[in-house]
Image (cartoon, rainbow, N blue to C red):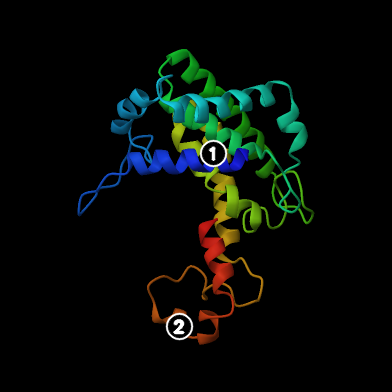
Amino acid sequence: MVLKTLTSVCLVALTLTATAGPSAAQPLTTHPRIWIRQQDLPRLRSWATSANPIYQDGLRALAVDFKARMDNGSLIAGDHGTNYGYTQYPVEWFAQVFAFMSLVENDPAVRADYANRAHTLLMYIMNKAVLGQTPGDGDFRGRVFATDMRSLFYGDAFPTTVDWIYQTLTPTDKATIRAVFQRWITENLTATTTGLDHPEPVWVLNSTALLGDIKREFPGKPVLILSMHS
């Protein structure tokens, strides 16, 4: 139910903020820039009021509940960083919600608190993941953490959180995140279940050489799509 609530809220927010882009959009150099841009913030904050039930009884209520779970320790205690099995409240999901709230809340002090919470949770995972992959499943370092079901459902939380709280990240934080993201990207590039899941040669782009083994176009396509999503 909680997941359904957040999903509905996010879909509404994304639908309301969607705008037609220019025919030749230029890359942004500012933050935020994933899903939300700096120029979107005044409009989003104008909706983040008690008069808006989607915000007041939906997103804000969820964020307040998440704060309580973070403060009483149940969040960290309940998430062992596994890919398999059921984790009701994944840490990265909380970080994403807090990061979003750090953009849309109207009170600067409240925004700063949400940003700090998102930063704490993000780096809790990153500082574990940067230690490298482990053969087991846990501690956010499992062999398929970045390529299997958990990343399919919650993987978008990592880049969005980094983008939305970018101003809180230190040079050390950024170096850690970069190392983790680079490892995860490489793992996704070569992720395999059937043995025919990804194009080869690896890192070759826009080349007919990728068509050399036609069998790769079919058996592993669903898994490849999952890895691309992750």
**Which residue matches tag 1?**
6
Q: Is residue 34 visible?
A: no
Q: Earlier in the sequence, mark 2 or mark 1?
A: 1
Q: Residue furthest right?
A: 136
Measured as percent of width and height from the top left, residue 227 is found at 56, 62
Which residue is depicted at the point 48% across and 67% down? 203
Residue 20 badge: none
Measured as percent of width and height from the top left, residue 76 is found at 73, 32
Mark 2 or 1: in front is 1
Which residue is depicted at the point 72% across and 44% down? 87
- Whole-number angstrom distance, CA of label 2 to CA of label 1: 41 Å
Q: Quadrant of residue 16?
A: top left
Q: Residues within 10 Å of mark 1 (few under 14, many from 20)?
A: some
Q: Quadrant of residue 18?
A: top left
Measured as percent of width and height from the top left, residue 37 is found at 33, 36
Q: Is residue 137 above or below residue 6?
A: below
On-image quarter of the C terminus: bottom right
Residue 211 badge: 2
Choose between 198 and 38: the one closer to the eye.
38
Mark 1 element type: helix
Measured as percent of width and height from the top left, residue 61 is found at 55, 25
Choose between 77 and 183: the one closer to the eye.
77
Q: Is residue 54 visible?
A: yes
The amino acid on which the numbered mark 1 sits, given as a three-letter code, is Leu
Q: Quadrant of residue 6?
A: top right
Which residue is depicted at the point 66% across and 71% down? 193
Which residue is depicted at the point 57% across and 49% down? 155
The amino acid on which the numbered mark 2 sits, given as a three-letter code, is Leu
Q: Residues within 10 Å of mark 2 (few under 14, many from 20)?
A: few
Q: Is residue 171 left or right of residue 223?
A: left
Mark 2 element type: helix
